[in-house]
Image (spheres, rainbow, N blue to C red):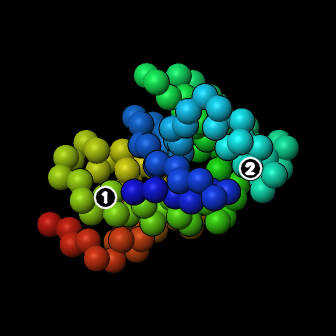
């Protein structure tokens, strides 16, 4: 499940307390990806690059992409799909935490029923 950012596919990676968008690229492609991102979203866009096996990973942390509504909408859709597919309860709780961070809530009741509003296809056992 990927999100398209500046013409490149980024994978939504849910970690323990955060979310990141990651794109695996070869060494010569990394600079092209970063230039494309900065051309579309501005020079202040912060990305992290690290090595993973033969590839380098271009990662965009959640605090950077939560400012951009077009990216945020795609990430929310992907997280809902991940929530529906996941059977592990711990992973589901991590996904709900990420959804709460990315969506505006107006009170405790709205935060409580966030998964039903964002993922209407999901049925919850009570």
Mark 1 vs mark 2: in front: 2
Task: Tell me residue 10's x, y (percent).
Answer: 52, 49
Residue marked by disc 1:
83
At x 65% / y 50%, what residue is drawn? Answer: 65
Task: Tell me residue 91's x, y (percent).
Answer: 28, 44
Q: Quadrant of residue 79?
A: bottom left
Q: Quadrant of residue 82?
A: bottom left
Mark 2, other Cα within 10 Å: few <14 / some 14–19 / many ≥20: some
Residue 100 vs 69, above or below: the answer is above
Residue marked by disc 2:
36
* Mark toward the start of the polypeptide (1 vs 2): 2
Question: Nearest the camera: 94 or 57?
Answer: 57
Mark 1, other Cα within 10 Å: few <14 / some 14–19 / many ≥20: many
Instruction: Tell me the SS state at disc 1.
Output: helix
The total number of labels drawn is 2
Q: Is any part of residue 115 visible from this angle?
A: yes
Instruction: Tell me the SS state at disc 2.
Output: helix
Question: Nearest the camera: 111 or 85?
Answer: 85
Residue at the extreme front: 28
Q: Is residue 83 left or right of residue 10?
A: left
Task: Tell me residue 95's x, y (percent).
Answer: 37, 50
Residue 108 vs 26, above or below: the answer is below
Disc 1 to disc 2, C-alpha distance: 30 Å
At x 36% / y 71%, what residue is drawn? Answer: 119
At x 27% / y 63%, what residue is drawn? Answer: 84
Q: Is residue 107 left or right of residue 68?
A: left
Q: Is residue 33 left or right of residue 4?
A: right
Residue at the extreme right: 43
At x 46% / y 24%, what residue is drawn? Answer: 54
Question: Nearest the camera: 50 or 61?
Answer: 50
């Amino acid at each position: 499940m990927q999100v398209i950012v500046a013409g490149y596919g980024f994978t939504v990676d849910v970690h323990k307390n955060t979310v990141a968008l990651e794109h695996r690229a070869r060494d010569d492609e990394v600079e092209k990806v970063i230039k494309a991102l900065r051309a579309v979203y501005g020079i202040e866009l912060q990305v992290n690059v690290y090595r993973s096996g033969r590839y380098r990973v271009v990662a965009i942390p959640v605090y950077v992409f939560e400012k951009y509504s077009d990216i945020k909408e795609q990430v929310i859709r992907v997280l809902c799909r991940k929530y529906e597919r996941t059977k592990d309860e711990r992973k589901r709780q991590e996904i709900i935490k990420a959804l709460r961070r990315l969506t505006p809530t107006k009170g405790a009741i709205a935060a409580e029923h966030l998964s039903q509003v964002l993922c209407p296809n999901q049925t919850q056992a009570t």
